[in-house]
Every structure is written in structure tokens, then in C-alpha cells.
Image: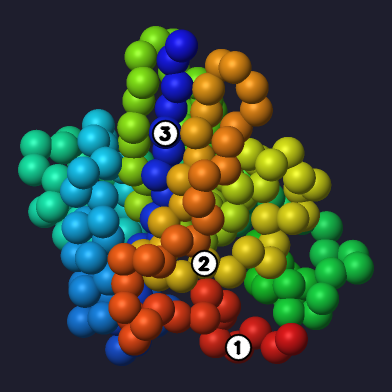
Amino acid sequence: MPSRLLFLARHGEQDEAEVEGNTGLSARGRRQAALLGERLRGARIDAVHHGPLLRAAETAELVVAALPGVPVHCSDSVGDHLPHDTDPTGLPPAYAGMLAGYDAAERVDGPRRTAEAVARFAAVPAEGDVRELVVTHSFLIAWLVRHALDAPERRWLGLGLHNAGLTVIRFGAGGPPNLIAVNDVAHLPPELRGTGMPPDFVF
């Protein structure tokens, strides 16, 4: 029976010099990405997809260095965007404040692109066994985990993900999606692991 094994990885740590811009990876981020590539060396990846921002593209490039011959594709649908126009009512102030930072256009465009990503990557293929890696951002990974669990829509919030952390979901015709791993950082030494939470988050 056909199946899709979807590997999801958050990009490596961003260069702190210009955190707000379209910056590439820090030295730590490059090490994280290289180690992620080593982790995936024997995983028989068929293709790697990444978002358009530089930090995702650089992460994919370093990962693919350990996966010779694997094709790489840039996809706008797996970029850094708001996955769902979530109602902030009743949410903790940190989440409500974050959601308030998105304008009307982003509240429409982000969910549209997320729907494209779900249709493309969170589905059983027509035939064969497909193994793909998507190098993306924490919001989309959180949404795909929520989608796999069929959890309430607002539950994409609250899933903190490490830079270069690995999440794996299997989609098969015989049942619901199988969440195999979430935010796995076994390939990273302790000094290259982060908290998985934004630096300004207050509990």
C-alpha cells in the first residue's frame, strides 16, 4: 500500500546580527544543519523541500551535502507564515499578542499557503512509498502535527520546536496519520539544543 514518510525539520539557528531580516544561519545554526544531514544520511530521502527564506535554504543546502543526488526544491507553501487565523479569545497574553501582530492580508495569505502545504505533503501518495524532507519553520510544523492528531485548530499554538529538530509523520492508506517523532534532537549535542521557545515568552 502507498505511504508517505514526511520528515519535517525546523531551520538551524538564525544569525543574531539581524534577527528581524531575511538572514542566514549563525555558526551554531550551520553546525546544527550539518548534524541534521548526518542524522538523515541513511533515511532514503527522495526529495528535500524548503521555504524561500535564507535560513531555510541554507539549512537545506547543508543537509543535502550529506544526501548526494537528492533533488532540492524551494516552495513558497512551506515558508514562514501564519498557519491559521486563530481567535485569540481565552488564549494566554503571549499568544494573543503574537497573533495581533499579523495584518489582514497575512491572516488570509498564511492559511492559504498552509492549506497548499497540507494538500501537497500531508497526504497519501497515489502509489509507491515516498520519503520527503521539508525544511521549514516552527509554525508550519506545529500545524502539521496538529493536523496529524486531528486536534482542535488552536492547538498549533504551544508547540515549541528546536532549531534543526526533527519531526516525522507517516501517512498511509490503512488508517490515520502516524506521528513517529516530534522535535527529536538526538543528533545535536546539548550545547546545540535550544529551549524551543521564543526568547520573550513569559510563562
Q: Position of residue 124 (x, y in %)?
A: 50, 21
The quadrant where residue 17 appears: bottom left
Dot 2: element:
loop
Disc 1, disc 2: CB below 8 Å?
no
* Side of 66 relative to 188 (left or right): left
Quadrant including the C terminus: bottom right
The residue pinned by badge 1 equals: 200
Label 3 neighbourhood size at 10 Å, few (<14), some (14-19), many (20+)? many
Choose between 147 and 139: the one closer to the eye: 147
Residue 166 percent across, percent down from the top left:
41, 56
Disc 1 vs disc 3: which is toward the camera? Answer: 3
Seen from the viewer's position, the closer of residues 15 and 129 is: 129
- Residue 122 — which label? none
| Helix, strand or loop for disc 3 | strand
Residue 77 in the image: state x and y as whole percent: 45, 42
Q: Nearer the viewer, residue 61 or 88?
A: 61
Q: Which residue matches tag 2?
A: 161
Q: Earlier in the sequence, mark 1 or mark 2?
A: 2
For the rendered model, the colour scheme is: rainbow
Taking the image as drawn, is residue 60 in sight? no
At 53% from the left and 55% from the top, the residue drawn is 182
Q: Residue at x 50, y 51 (%)?
A: 181
Query: Mark 1 or mark 2, which is nearer to you?
Result: 2
What amino acid is at disc 2?
Answer: Leu
The residue where tag 3 is placed is 5
Three-letter amino acid code of the residue under disc 1: Asp
Badge 1: how crowded within 10 Å, few (<14), some, or many (20+)? few
